[in-house]
């Protein structure tokens, strides 16, 4: 995004987030965040008790690191511009990034799930699975009081629960949910390899998770995406009518805080616009060979680079 942070390196992202928060919240205890980054890396690499390494190619370590950095930047933009009474403060800021780090943990297979072919099988339920891990993990870093709240807030990143139905008593906690949901969307859609990843990796996950094609109880088959190219062709509509509506209505237009962080135009939105403009031109010419960027994943258990 800024070419200053390597979002494939947990240590680099950790240092960038901690530096940002140390400047925003002088004197705050950020040790829980340091541990959370270490535990996140162990989890995705298969070194965390009870879990196998991440094997989903689209929802890999890079996606989570990219999204977690976006979360920290949104929090910074929010707290530097809002009224004092509305500021999230250091503890909620840390909680938000921890939720971001674990928001896709539900894709990871547990140790007893070794027979499952790929974690993408859990696409439809991954947020609830991740919520279970978050609730169990937070007491380990001194956030036990927020465990159940965090298990609800992670649902701002998914579609298993309607956002309007998520019960949150404090407006500042709801803001954390809106920020983490927004970070998830703008983090991935601004990735310079986003289009290639959709074609090479996301479609495969949709097949595993029975999103691309789904057999209904009555025997009829619903075909949402007939091929990787079909997914690409439908992506502009997904952005215009699903993502933008979600950002602006369900998530309270908090993407504006990215611009506040950057003290100018949002670099996330600039990259999203560039991706969508390029995609629309590509669809007009039907020249999908123009998607030439080398596409790779940081996940284990599969080809790291697309064929």
Image (spheres, grey):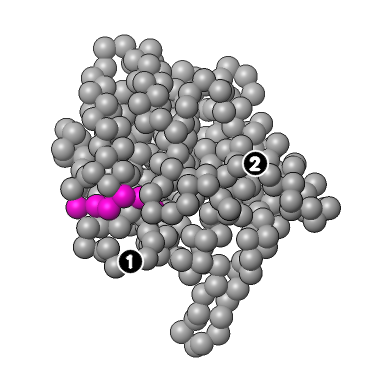
Q: Secondary structure at mark 1?
A: loop
Residue 10 part of the magenta segment: no
Query: Quadrant of residue 180 in the image?
Result: top left
- Mark 2 lies on residue: 293
In this orientation, which residue lies closer to the viewer: 296 or 262? Answer: 296
Residue 276 horizontal/vertical position (percent) = 70, 43
For the residues labelled 2 and 1, the Cα–Cα distance comes to 31 Å
- Mark 1 lies on residue: 116
| Rendered residue at 64%/23% (across/down) | 265
Q: Secondary structure at mark 2?
A: loop
| Rendered residue at 39%/36% (across/down) | 176
Instruction: Tell me the crowding category of disc 2: few under 14, some 14 to 19, or many 20 or more residues within 10 angstroms, Cα based.
Output: few
Residue 126 horizontal/vertical position (percent) = 37, 57
- Looking at the image, residue 154 sits to the left or right of residue 148; the answer is right
Q: Relative to residue 103, is residue 171 depicted above or below? A: above
Q: Which residues are magenta?
A: 50-55
Instruction: Tell me the crowding category of disc 1: few under 14, some 14 to 19, or many 20 or more residues within 10 angstroms, Cα based.
Output: few
Residue closest to the far right? 285
| Rendered residue at 60%/73% (across/down) | 223
In this orientation, which residue lies closer to the viewer: 9 or 209? Answer: 9
Q: Magenta-highlighted stretch: main secondary structure?
A: loop
Give the numbered dot on residue 280: none
């Amino acid at each position: 995004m800024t070419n200053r942070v390597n979002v494939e390196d947990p240590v680099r992202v950790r240092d960038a987030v901690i530096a940002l928060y140390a400047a925003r919240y002088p004197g705050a205890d950020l040790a829980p965040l340091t541990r959370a980054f270490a535990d996140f890396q162990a989890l995705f690499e298969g070194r965390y008790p009870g879990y196998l390494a991440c094997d989903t190619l689209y929802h890999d370590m890079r996606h989570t690191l990219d999204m977690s950095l976006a979360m920290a930047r949104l929090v910074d933009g929010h707290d530097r511009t809002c009224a004092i009474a509305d500021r999230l403060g250091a503890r909620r800021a840390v909680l938000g990034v921890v939720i971001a780090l674990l928001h896709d943990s539900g894709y990871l297979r547990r140790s007893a799930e070794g027979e499952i072919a790929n974690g993408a099988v859990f696409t439809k339920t991954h947020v609830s699975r991740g919520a279970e891990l978050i609730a169990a993990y937070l007491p380990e870093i001194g956030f036990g009081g927020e465990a159940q709240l965090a298990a609800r807030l992670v649902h701002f990143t998914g579609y298993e629960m309607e956002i309007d139905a998520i019960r949150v008593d404090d407006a500042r906690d709801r803001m954390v949910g809106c920020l983490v949901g927004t970070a998830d969307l703008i983090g991935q859609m601004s990735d310079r390899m986003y289009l290639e990843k959709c074609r090479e990796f996301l479609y495969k996950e949709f097949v595993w998770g029975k999103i691309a094609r789904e057999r209904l109880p009555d025997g009829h088959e619903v075909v949402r995406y007939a091929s990787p190219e079909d997914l690409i062709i439908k992506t502009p509509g997904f952005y215009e009518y699903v993502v933008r509506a979600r950002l602006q209505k369900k998530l309270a237009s908090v993407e504006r805080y990215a611009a506040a962080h950057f003290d100018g135009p949002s670099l996330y939105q600039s990259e999203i616009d560039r991706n969508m403009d390029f995609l629309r031109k590509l669809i007009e010419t039907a020249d999908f060979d123009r998607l030439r960027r080398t596409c790779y994943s940081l996940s284990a258990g599969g080809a790291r680079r697309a064929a």
